[in-house]
Amino acid sequence: MSLVSENIKFFRKQLGFTQEQLALRIGIKRSLLGAYEEGRAEPGLETLTTMSRLFGASVDLLISESLS
């Protein structure tokens, strides 16, 4: 699992969202969010930017530091 995948899952749980709820908020399919969290896919810059706004964290933080 990558830092990005760990951090996405960490923030989702901190916000109390299910994968479905977070996916709807950021405009992607739940299955794609699951792939991000499992490290099978990496989000693009646009998705990272959307997530960072929702999480109240910088893109840099999402991709470079372990938050869990």
Image (spheres, rainbow, N blue to C red):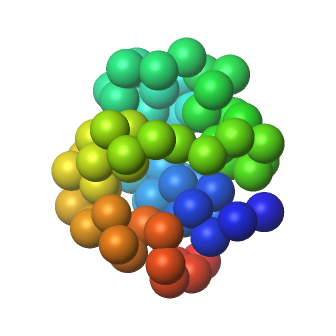
Q: How many marks?
A: 0
Task: Write the residue at 29% across / 55% down.
Answer: 52
Q: In this view, does 61 lie to the left or right of 50?
A: right
Q: In which quarter of the image is the C terminus?
A: bottom right
Task: Write the residue at 44% across / 33% down.
Answer: 22
Q: In which quarter of the image is the N terminus?
A: bottom right
Q: In this view, does 60 lie to the left or right of 18?
A: left
Task: Write the residue at 48% across / 69% down.
Answer: 63
Res. 19 visible in picture: yes
Residues 43 and 8: in front is 43
From what the image shows, is residue 41 above or below residue 13?
above
Task: Write the residue at 52% across / 42% down.
Answer: 43
Residues 64 and 6: in front is 64
**Residue 42 % position (x, y):** 61, 46
Where residue 5 sits, quadrant-wise, is bottom right
**Residue 7 % position (x, y):** 54, 64
**Residue 28 % position (x, y):** 47, 21
Residues 49 and 26: in front is 49
Q: In this view, does 13 lie to the left or right of 46?
A: right
From what the image shows, is residue 7 above or below residue 17?
below
Q: Is residue 26 left or right of residue 39?
A: left
From what the image shows, is residue 2 above or below residue 34?
below
Res. 16 visible in picture: no
Where residue 59 sits, quadrant-wise, is bottom left
**Residue 51 % position (x, y):** 34, 46
Residues 35 and 10: in front is 35
